Amino acid sequence: MKTLVILAHPDINHSNVNKRWKEELEKYPNDIIIHELYEEYPDWNIDIAKEQQLLESNDFVILQFPVYWYSYPPLLKKWLDDVFTHGWAYGSNGNKLKGKKIGMAMSIGDKEENYSHTGSVGFSADEIITPFKATAAHIGAIALPYFSVFRASFQISSEEVEQSANDFIKYISKYK
Ligand SMILES: Cc1cc2nc3c(=O)[nH]c(=O)nc-3n(C[C@H](O)[C@H](O)[C@H](O)COP(=O)(O)O)c2cc1C
């Protein structure tokens, strides 16, 4: 069984973390499918049938993205809106994602210590992903613990980026 990584970065060529994660994923073509939304859909016209087929064929899905305004980049949100349809993902006959494992790999710009009730963000990273967890619950999917790296915006060293790329692969192996 392969791991399907839905990668959503609006400007991957100028990315530091997600670009490196993608390069690491590319080392495992027999095990990992990288599905890059901004490359696949430059016009944002999502092929819903194709996306649903891809999800139906894979039981382990990871959403990989940089955190933008404590949420998904917009094309990933549109992908969720378009693809997780009534009668397919939810509703009385919508059970196509039921029991599938869904994880998230997020690069987070700010420091980890700021993601707390007393920190400048005021919320933990786990609280930020509440919409993801509620979505998974609604469609009967299994929401895995998220994978992340903090300080992705500016203070992260190249060694830490390398380490996070290796840790991302370990995360995939752990939950596969
Ligand atoms: C439009 C925009 C919104 C952002 N919002 C947040 C945010 O809400 N919280 C945060 O910690 N970082 C935020 N960042 C920083 C990004 O998370 C960070 O630049 C990204 O994770 C770095 O990954 P990359 O090297 O792959 O681009 C934002 C960046 C941009 C461009």
Image: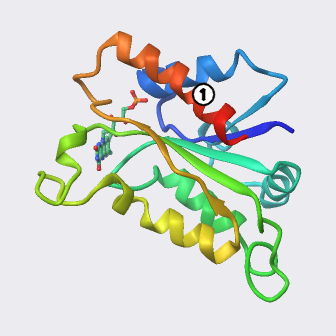
The answer to whether 86 is drawn above or below residue 43 in the figure is below
Q: Residue at x 75, y 38 (%)?
A: 3
Q: Determine which quarter of the picture holds residue 7.
A: top right
Residue 140 as seen in the image, left or right of residue 57:
left
Q: Is residue 160 visible?
A: yes
13 vs 94, left or right, is: left
- Front residue of 61 and 175: 175
Image position of 70 (left or right of 33): left
Circle 1 — which element? helix
Residue that carries the numbered disc 1 in the rendered image:
170
Q: Position of residue 61 (x, y in %)?
A: 70, 47
The reply to whether residue 15 is in sight is no
Q: Position of residue 130 (x, y in %)?
A: 43, 66
Look at the picture and state if 49 lies above or below 14: below
- Residue 42 is situated, as x and y percent measured from the top left of the image, at 62, 41
* Circle 1: residue type: Lys
Give the residue at x 70% y 72%: 140
Q: Quadrant of the N terminus?
A: top right
- Residue at position x 40%, y 56% in the image: 71
For the C terminus, which image quadrant?
top right
